[in-house]
Amino acid sequence: MPSSKKYKILFVTSEVVPFMKTGGLADVSSALTQKLTEMGHQVRIVVPKYGSIDERKYKIHEVVRLKDLKTQIGDKEVSFSLRSSFLVGPKARVQIYFLDNMEYFVSRHSLYEDPITGEEFKDNDERFILLNKSVFELIQKLGWIPDIIHINDWQCSLIPAYLKTVHKNNEMFQSIKTILTIHNLVYQGIFPKSSFAKTGLPEQLNSDKGIIHSSKVNFLKAGIQYADIINTVSATYAKEICSIKEFGYGLDTLLAKRKKDIYGIINGIDEAIWNPEKDKLIAKNYSQKNIADKIENKIALCENFGFAADENIPIIGIISRLTDTKGFDLLQKAFSDIAKLNVRVVLLGTGEKKYQKYFEDYAAKHPNKLSCYLGFDEKLAHLIEAGSDMLLIPSKSEPCGLNQMYSLVYGTVPIVHKTGGLADTVVNYTDKNQDGNGFVFDKYDAKEMVKEIKRAVEIYNNDKATWSKIIKNGMKSTFSWIDSTKQYVDLYKKLAD
Ligand code: ADP
């Protein structure tokens, strides 16, 4: 039963749309906090105030009580302020506090890396220790005690460690529970052992039993170790990170130990942006009722990618970062076999040079088979979702994945590897399972992938009724943030009641 109790939630994150974004974390931070507020929960966000954030546009103002606060980072005394504004959405306004410190955040436009060298900032340890510590100052100065501190990824993962050690006996913090959401296990906040002294955590944590991993300080390890509950962004990925060594990126043993406290909640999609009925970036809007109009998008897609219009040749779309994790090793291996089928492929993506070169060369040699745009283009992404017949997502691992959800609601049939969020959203269509909404290959293997693509093309060519059914099964899907938010509230309930 969903809880009707309302909670006080302090949501700590390193990015939130529309203020700043490098990845899915920013979308989740924005959508989830708004939905929680709409449902009547009291939510406040804490996020760093990077130099790129427009103070005037967002009406960020000083709060006397939260001005010129001080904390220690190792031997350094650091001053900071927390300044106030609102995240304003269509249905909710969420209180947001910006962590203001010139040296660490305001003087830099980029979030984690030096834009000139492309390397992570050398003082990321100090920058995010400050974010973690500022939260305790905020609570004390406001006298606003949250039921839950919801932390995200490594950047805020020291918070549960501070709560359970440094602040253990502080009356004010006694009842606070923590939840850690892992959006990406690859990034762990790894620093030299010498960074430990800067944290101010007690010496007993300066070991493998604490927050040291492979002789380095590991912020995410602190979160995994000390958060009361952990979740990641799909149920299958939650299982995979606890049971498959290579999915745990070195933290598998620790994750396995916490298995019973690890949950999976799939992200929702932003229906204001990804909805074929209203999408302003596609050639023609359509819905389940007038699915025939989808063809106008296929024609526009052919035009954009330089293919002569031919309604009968299926188009396979790919929108992705060109990396091994996204399955590009498999794709490269299988590509000449895919091209032997009566299909056309459109590829939109950026990523590793070797893959860019391979696909660029292939497209130059076989322009009637493959057309690429190797760049980032929001409008093309929408057109590919609307105009393709199939979308191929062969990821080796996929915490949640958004493209398969978009393609389902756009009536573009996904062909995916059975992993993480892909496994949780795409159901293999078979004669026995007529509720299927796509094609799924179990084993991460080029031949298996080609087999599923062949099966899809076969049905597309020879069995229009079945193809329509698969499309309809997909278009029925809703990936609403309301459902996901309710699941988060259930986790809060587990912790706070
Ligand atoms: P990840 O966050 O791991 O890259 P997701 O599937 O969760 O993968 O989200 C990727 C998002 O980025 C999707 O919305 C996808 O449409 C978009 N995207 C990826 N590459 C491009 C590109 N080259 N141009 C436009 N959008 C892109």
Image (cartoon, rainbow, N blue to C red):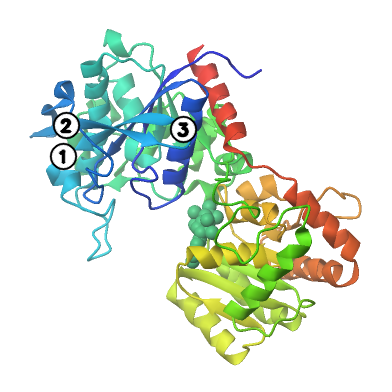
Q: Is residue 420 above or below residue 396?
A: above
Rendering coords of residue 10 (x, y %):
37, 25
Which residue sits at x=25%, y=20%?
Answer: 166
Q: Which of the numbered marks, if any, corresponds to residue 346? A: none
Q: Which of the numbered marks, if any, corresponds to residue 101? A: 1
- Give the residue at mark 2: 81
Q: Nearer the viewer, residue 391 or 202?
A: 391
Rendering coords of residue 266 (x, y %):
59, 40
Quarter the N terminus occupies = top right
Q: Nearer the viewer, residue 22 or 171?
A: 22
Q: Earlier in the sequence, mark 3 or mark 2?
A: 3
Amino acid type at mark 2: Ser
Foreground disc of the pair 1, 3 = 3
Name the element at disc 2. strand
User: Quick one: label 2, few (<14), some, or many (20+) residues within 10 Å?
Assistant: many
Give the total of numbered labels: 3
Name the element at disc 3. helix
Which residue sits at x=85%, y=55%?
Answer: 469
Rendering coords of residue 350 (x, y %):
46, 69
Foreground disc of the pair 3, 2 = 3
Q: Earlier in the sequence, mark 1 or mark 3?
A: 3
Instruction: Tell me whether circle 1 and circle 3 mark residues in contact (CB < 8 Å).
Output: no
Q: Which of the numbered marks, if any, corresponds to residue 34? A: 3
Instruction: Tell me whether circle 2 and circle 1 mark residues in contact (CB < 8 Å).
Output: yes
